Structures are given as C-alpha cells and as structure tokens.
Amino acid sequence: MSRFKIAVSGGSQFDYCCRDIIKISQEVGKEIAANDCVLITGATTGAPYFAAQGAKKAKGISIGFSPAASERSHIKKYRLPMDYSDVIVYTGFGYSGRNLLMTRAADGVIFICGRMGTLNEFTISFEDQKPLGVLVGSGGTADQIKGLIKKPHRVKLRITYQREPKKLVRELIKLIKQSKGR
C-alpha cells in the first residue's frame, strides 16, 4: 500500500499569522512524517517551509513543487529555498500552475495561515473535492475558510477544522482513507 501524500499550503510570509506559526507548522510536518505520509509543499518559505523542517526532523520525506522551470530560476528569480526537500519538481508554470500541480499530486491538503496563494490552493482543492484540513487559529486564509464555504454546497465535502496539529493530521488521514474506501 502506498503512502498518503499530504500537501501543506500556507503563507510564505508569516508576519500576519499567529505568533506560534513556526512551531505549529513544524509540528504539522512532524506529524505527517510520524504517520508515515509524504509531505508535499510549494517548495517555498513560511509555513510550508517550517512544515518541511518538521518532517525532516522526524526523518520524513518532503517533495516540493516549484513555480520555477529550473533550479537556477528557483534560487535566483523566485528566491526560494532548496533545503528540507528531498525532491523538487520544477514545474515552470509560475505560482498558479504550481498550485494546481501540487494540490492535484496530494491525497489531502492542510491549510495553515496564508494569503491569496493559499486561497488559490484552497479553491483548487475544494473544487477537486480533496480531503481538507484547516489549522484553526493560525491566521490569514485558514481562519476565513469556514465562512467562505457556507454557501457553496458539496455533497462529498470532506473537511476537518482543528486547533491541534496532531489531531489535524490524524483527522485528515481518516478523511483520506474514507475518500479512498480504506
């Protein structure tokens, strides 16, 4: 049986996020690894980067999807980090194309804080009816999601809202299993 792939979407800048954003993002990454899942990120800074740090500290696997077409562009043009990813996929599609590929590659997506890019990743995941996890209290987009989906109705919507990283990852894995009939 293959490992579940969980994407972490969140703010690349975090000055508007909760004050514990580094710690809780690292905890999410650690829990993904501890549950034998693969972490997927946008190969970026901020909350996804801290999640990748946590996953690596727990000896997990981290795959980054870059908006750049090459390693050089990833570093020079986008100014994105190379560390904490075991593999970086250079999409060459900019941020919006990267977001589509990243979320589609995942079995489920976790949202931590965030801004417009996180909102874009949320809408893609929502429309694809992916299992979703929202880290409540992390700030930004994550704290707006519940209000955003009050009107759009989806019969098969699978979403969990949690304040604790450990419980968030566990509940998301349950939703992923349900979506796969396991």
Image (cartoon, rainbow, N blue to C red):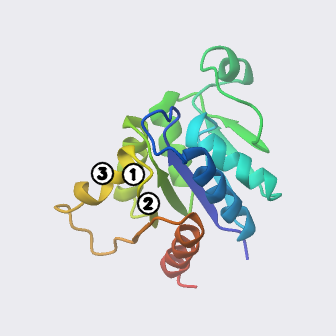
- Residue drawn where x is 43% and y is 46% of the image: 121
Q: Residues within 10 Å of mark 2 (few under 14, many from 20)?
A: many
N-term-proximal mark, 1 vs 2: 2
Q: Amino acid at mark 3?
A: Gln
Instruction: Write the residue at 21% across / 67% down.
Output: 153
Q: Residue furthest left?
A: 151
Q: Nearer the viewer, residue 115 or 72?
A: 115
- Disc 2 from disc 3: Cα separation: 10 Å
Within 10 Å of disc 1 (Cα), the crowding (few <14, some 14-19, many 20+) is many
Spot occupied by residue 162 in the image (x, y as percentages of width and height): 45, 67
Numbered badge on residue 180: none
Count of all numbered marks drawn on residues in the image: 3
Which type of secondary structure does the marked residue at label 3 adopt? helix
Q: Position of residue 18 (x, y in %)?
A: 46, 45
Q: Nearer the viewer, residue 126 or 45?
A: 45
**Looking at the image, do the residues carrying marks 1 and 2 touch, with CB atoms under 8 Å apart?**
yes
Tag 2 residue = 134
Please tell me which residue is depicted at 48% across the width and 44% down the height of the picture.
100
Q: Dot 1 corresponds to which residue?
A: 142
Circle 2 — which element?
strand
Identify the residue position indicated by label 3 in the image: 144
Query: Of the residues under marks 2 and 3, which one precedes in the sequence?
Result: 2
Q: What quarter of the picture does the N terminus occupy?
A: bottom right
**Can you give x and y, in whole percent of width and height, for residue 67 in the image?**
57, 30
| Residue 88 location (% of width, % of height) | 72, 38
- Circle 3 crowding by C-alpha within 10 Å: few under 14, some 14–19, many from 20: some
Q: Are marks 1 and 3 in contact (CB under 8 Å)?
A: yes
- Left or right placement of residue 28 versus residue 56 in this view: left
Q: Which quadrant of the figure has residue 174?
A: bottom right
The answer to whether 120 is drawn above or below residue 152 in the figure is above
Furthest residue toward right: 59
